[in-house]
């Protein structure tokens, strides 16, 4: 069982930066990902990173602004968010894939373990 805890959310102005962190209960060899859910919308994929950090991918709307990374031990994943826009306002969730080493995503169905979410609010 993997437990995930997200931190780092907050309220910022458009153009500001935030860094989200996701701490797992132990070292993880899973693909890790960030998803987000805006009010009244379905949860959507944001970014993912392979078990060793060697491969990443992003949804088009955040490319060039967001960066996903993970520690060498694999038990903390970050999402650096720059040049934030009001449309980035959402609850952000961290997720871990369902099998070690397997490249998972971007479908939510590929992810077994989820954090409780952290709110990011961007005002114009």
Image (cartoon, grey):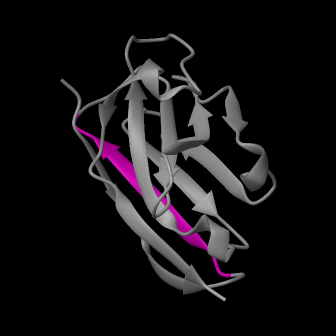
Magenta stretch: give its range.
16-25
Q: Residue at x 57, y 15 (%)?
A: 103
Residue 1 position within the rendered picture, expressed as x and y whole percent measured from the top left: 18, 23
Residue 119 position within the rendered picture, expressed as x and y whole percent measured from the top left: 39, 68
As for residue 19 lying within the magenta part, the answer is yes
Q: Assign the magenta stretch its main secondary structure.
A: strand
Residue 27 position within the rendered picture, expressed as x and y whole percent measured from the top left: 32, 28
Image quadrant containing the C terminus: bottom right
Residue 29 position within the rendered picture, expressed as x and y whole percent measured from the top left: 41, 20
Q: Residue at x 63, y 63 (%)?
A: 81
> Can you see residue 9?
yes
Q: Nearer the viewer, residue 21 or 88?
A: 88
Q: Nearer the viewer, residue 45 or 55?
A: 45
Q: Residue at x 41, y 12 (%)?
A: 100
As for residue 11 lying within the magenta part, the answer is no
| Residue 3 sits above or below residue 64 on the image | above
Q: What is the quadrant of residue 46 in the picture?
A: top right
Q: Is residue 68 left or right of residue 61?
A: left
Q: Residue at x 55, y 71 (%)?
A: 18
Q: Nearer the viewer, residue 84 or 108?
A: 108
Q: Is residue 4 left or right of residue 61?
A: left
């Amino acid at each position: 069982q993997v437990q995930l805890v997200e931190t780092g959310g907050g309220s910022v102005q458009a153009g500001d930066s935030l860094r989200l962190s996701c701490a797992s209960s132990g070292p993880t060899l899973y693909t890790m990902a960030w998803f987000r859910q805006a009010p009244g919308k379905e949860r959507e994929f944001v970014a993912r990173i392979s078990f060793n950090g060697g491969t990443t991918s992003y949804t088009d709307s955040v490319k060039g602004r967001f960066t996903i990374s993970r520690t060498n031990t694999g038990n903390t994943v970050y999402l650096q968010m720059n040049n934030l826009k009001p449309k980035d306002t959402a609850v952000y969730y961290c997720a871990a894939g369902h099998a070690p080493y397997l490249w998972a995503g971007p479908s939510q169905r590929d992810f077994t373990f989820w954090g409780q979410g952290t709110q990011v609010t961007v005002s114009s």
